[in-house]
Image (tube, helix red, strand yellow):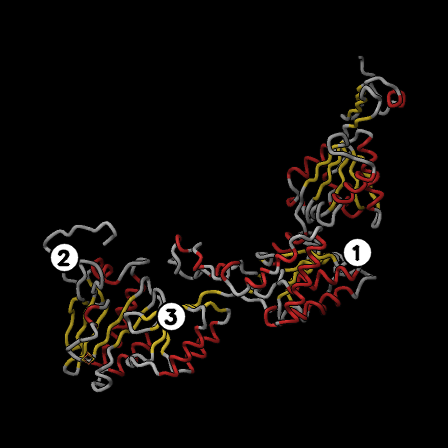
Amino acid sequence: MEVPENIITCIMCIYSKHPYVHRGAFSSYFIVLDQEGARTMKGKLLVIGFGPGYEKHITERAKEAIQESDIIIGYKTYIELIKGLITGKQIISTGMTEEVSRAQEAVKQAELGKKVAVISSGDAGVYGMAGLVYEVLIEKGWKRDTGVEVEVIPGISAINSCAALLGAPIMHDACTISLSDHLTPWTLIEKRIEAAAQADFVIALYNPKSGRRTKQIMEAQRILLKYRSPETPVGLVKSAFRDSQHIVLTSLRDMLEHEIGMLTTVIIGNSSTFLHDGLMITPRGYQRKYTLTEKVQPLKPHQRLQREAEPWALDQTEELEFSMNIDVVVGKDSSRELAEEALNIVLREKAAAPQVMKQKFQSIFEIAVSPGVTNKKFTAKQMMILSEIAGEECVLEYTPDHYIKLQIVTSDPHEIVKKLTQSNFVLSPVGDVLTVKACDFCDGEKRDAIPYAEKLYEKLGGMKLPKELKLGVNGCGMACYGAVKEDIGIVYRKGAFDLFLGAKTAGRNAHPGQIVAEGIPPEEIIEVIEKIVQEYKEKAHPNERFYKFFKRVKKIQGFEYQDITPKIKMEVPICGE
Ligand code: SF4
């Protein structure tokens, strides 16, 4: 059948039984009429989020969608923001509170076969027009298969654009809450702020304040201060990426002293968010397993996902009890019921044990303790303190180095260090650090070298190194505590120290350290050892043991390596050297 030209809408066809296809001469839309005479329109609704308003942050698809549309419908201010992209288009713009009429008009035009762009700033699906467009369509009996096509084109929402300007504040669980109570009862908004504050979400407050709504932001602050420190970092971003952009970093306590308006997004940090050099940063949690200053991590790749490395995981913590309560809410029918029940559980938990509500950042804290550098005797009281600190879940391990190593799941390692120090324990970090292994100097009878052992512990104990390093200090030529079998060993003899370097303590080719000097005067020994350790720290490869380093560099602080490779070639066992 021949298609008539220049026909936009043919009333005859709509009410007749003829399957015409009409093509508009000055646009590219189609109207298709089926055999029954009912219309199946091929217009399209393009619901577009164009981001913060800066052209470079508008997605390629959003630009394309604007270009392929016949009509652009939007709030006047938004139309103004993208005016460079809509030249020559038919524009329908209305003011604030006219969202419904814009959505209705868009649907109407799409049903007439036009491609209609409905624009929102930010993301159309985040407090934008996407939901409303669908609601208007659904009210009219729209179905996806038979109704006009709808495409929602995502954009950068304010939570993302403002976060980028502030640093990285939403690196962890975050939520958005609009403080506008024009369409939402304040009591519900209040509940949401309360729940988000309790659950330690980073919170982005949209629509925080307007000319008439001035109290909401004050109420929000009041609720948040019930659960968060007044020092909690807060970022205020006005008109992100627009000419009038303004950024303020402040705190929960002081935020109201700054300008907050319709165009401001308020980002409240969680309990671990911090400020650094004008940036607001929320840690993702890597510090629980990784040491960010080290190339070699305490947990090897194969250990990082093991259960022992994640004592905070669902099935491994005391919080299991709390999480089990989640079962109570399973079975609720709607998400609202689920949320309300979850909130009730939180409130009950809080009433029963307020301390449970404090955000816990638990991690495994490892530390080695001993009664003293030279003292090998734990007192009964010290054992009781250890037992008290350890509780039922801590691991206590007695090591060949005369330390007790504690592995404690805690959110407050400083408190544990304080208790141990008050109980006169000598503390050493665990891992790739220097450990001083002194003998007991015949229970203190041979005291001459004790001050040097203590001084070495004081100066070098716990120093981070490319690999763990043990420094043995023995009080006489008997060397019964095996100083010569340590990475570095010093043996006090005839009023001076003998120095041994590069022992290999394990394996079939284990060997003592090489004696590199005899009779080092006591007043020099501390400096000699310090320099050796410093050279190893600076020049060793990551993970390179001291004996390998000595073998490689051949000379440390003038002390020469002697080749002591066995004459026979030793077979390397399957399980390693
Ligand atoms: S190395 Fe000497 S001083 Fe030290 S405990 Fe043994 S015998 Fe006593």
**Numbered mark located on residue 565 in the image:** 2
**331 vs 113, nearest the viewer:** 331
Q: Residue at x 20, y 65 (%)?
A: 503
On whether ligand 1 comes within 8 Å of the CB at mark 2, the answer is: no
Task: Label 3, secondary structure: give it.
Answer: strand
Decide: few, some or many residues near mark 3? Use Cα within 10 Å; few <14, some 14-19, many ≥20.
some
**Residue 521's spot in the image, x, y percent?**
19, 80
Quarter of the image for the C terminus: give it.
Answer: bottom left
Quarter of the image for the N terminus: give it.
Answer: top right
Left or right of 401, for residue 356? right
Residue 210 in the image: above or below residue 460: above
Residue named by callout 1: 184
Tell me the amino acid under the disc marked 1.
Answer: Thr
Residue named by callout 3: 396
Q: Does residue 248 show up?
A: no
**Residue 18's spot in the image, x, y percent?**
84, 17
Tell me the amino acid under the disc marked 3.
Answer: Leu
Residue 162 in the image: above or below residue 436: above
Left or right of 34, for residue 194? left
Q: Residue at x 66, y 52 (%)?
A: 331
